[in-house]
Image: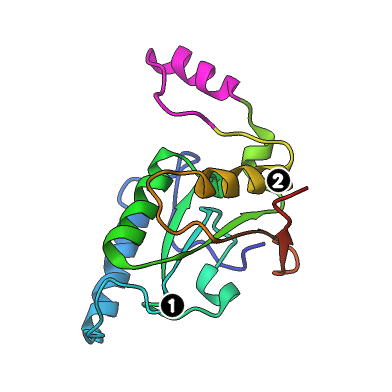
Amino acid sequence: MSTHAPRFAQSARGAAAPGAETVIDRLVESNRAYAAGFTDPGMGARPVLGVAVVACMDARIDLHAALGLQLGDCHTVRNAGGVVTDDTIRSLTISQRALGTSSVVLIHHTGCGLQTLTEDFRHELELEVGQRPAWAVEAFRDVDQDVRQSMQRVRTSPFLPHTDDVRGFVFDVTTGLLREIDPRV
């Protein structure tokens, strides 16, 4: 649970109340403060540890802190569920072929919102906006099985030259611990 106090007035949909600072205003202001003390770290785009981490976008997961990573250590690819989609494969392919990574860590988590959705979400969205999304929701019920499926998608991609060091985990959002998933079960 977040201990952050609200920093600005917002409506139920996240828009700022009239005349109030918006979330994006606050982020831009924070960036100015950050940039004032910023020093170029002098590093390239190649991750020092040669690893790419694919994880859920869930705001409760601080990947760098959870994995003991520093700036420049890894490539991070985040999406809803941390599932391996075509776009994830695109990012991993660039990471491996152009930027030298060879290991892939996949991290799903307990209490994922994708466990509460179904592909009906796409249908409902189509009815609302009049256009069917080109993407799949990738909803799942069994987080362990979805990690296995994601590992399999990485291991069998013809675009990825490095598929031997691929490991999958479930992050427990209440304890902060990773639980490794056996790909063979």
Which residue carries the number 1 mark? 49
Residue placed most toward the observer, 46 or 100: 100
Q: Say what amino acid the circle numbered 1 marks.
A: Leu
> Where does the magenta region start and end?
119-137
Say which label, 1 or 2, has the lower sequence index.
1
Q: Is residue 109 above or below residue 139?
A: below
Is the residue 95 above or below the residue 82 in the image?
Answer: below
Residue 143's disc is 2
Say left or right for 177 vs 117.
right
- Residue occupying image coordinates x 31% and y 55%: 94
Q: How many marks?
A: 2
The residue lying toward the viewer, choosing from 183 and 5, is 183
Q: Residue, x 56% and y 54% (percent of image)?
A: 58
Q: Position of residue 12 (x, y in %)?
A: 50, 40
Magenta region includes residue 160: no
Q: Is residue 143 left or right of residue 139?
A: right
Determine if residue 22 is in view: no
Q: Can you tell which quarter of the image residue 68 is in?
A: bottom right
Q: Residue 4: x, y in percent?
A: 56, 67
Q: Position of residue 88 (x, y in %)?
A: 42, 47
Secondary-structure class at tag 2: helix
**Rendering quarter of residue 115:** top right
Decide whether residue 122 is among the magenta residues.
yes
**Vertical order, 42 against 139 (above or below):** below
Under circle 1, the secondary element is loop
